[in-house]
Amino acid sequence: MEYVYAALILNETGAEINEDNVTGVLEAAGVDVEESRVKALVAALEDVDIEEAIETAAAAPAAGASAGGSADADASADEADDDDDDDEEAEAADEADDDEEEGDGGEGLGELFG
């Protein structure tokens, strides 16, 4: 994630997003820089308009939140959501059982917190 942040910092300051600049920002932040990740990031951002991507990402949640309709439509949607939630809970329980059986070897988000 810090690699993306470095690119965002460079974009905000108007500096060119290249390998040397990204590496410099990361080293200044005390990150152990992996050259392959820097190259991949610079290559991935080569044809991307970062400002447009930020605007699009910021607008997406607002567009999804602006739903309107009648009370009957809302009730039907709530019932459908409840059915979906039940299905998702069952799938999540199955996946949790699978994870316990496999013994994930210390990988995953749990390692971040303990």
Image: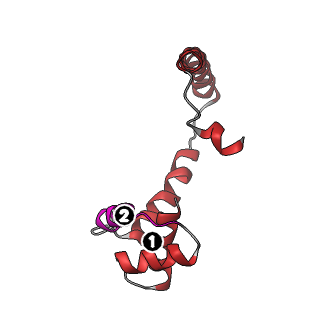
Please tell me in which quadrant of the rendered image residue 23 appears. bottom left
Q: Residue 18 lies in magenta, yes or no?
A: no
Q: Position of residue 35 (x, y in %)?
A: 37, 66
- Left or right: 10, with 101 as reference point: left
Magenta portion: prevailing SS class = helix
Q: Earlier in the sequence, mark 1 or mark 2?
A: 1
Q: Mark 2 packing: few (<14 Cα in 10 Å), some, or many (20+)? A: some
Image: 70 above or below 36: above
- Left or right: 13, with 109 as reference point: left
What segment carries the magenta color? 32-44
Q: Mark 1 packing: few (<14 Cα in 10 Å), some, or many (20+)? A: many
Please tell me in which quadrant of the rendered image residue 111 appears. top right
Image: 9 above or below 101: below
Q: Which residue is mark 1?
A: 7
* Image disc number at residue 41: 2
The amino acid beneath tag 2 is Leu
Mark count = 2
Q: CA distance from mark 1 to mark 2?
A: 8 Å
On the question of residue 17 being in view, the answer is no
Q: Position of residue 80 (x, y in %)?
A: 56, 20
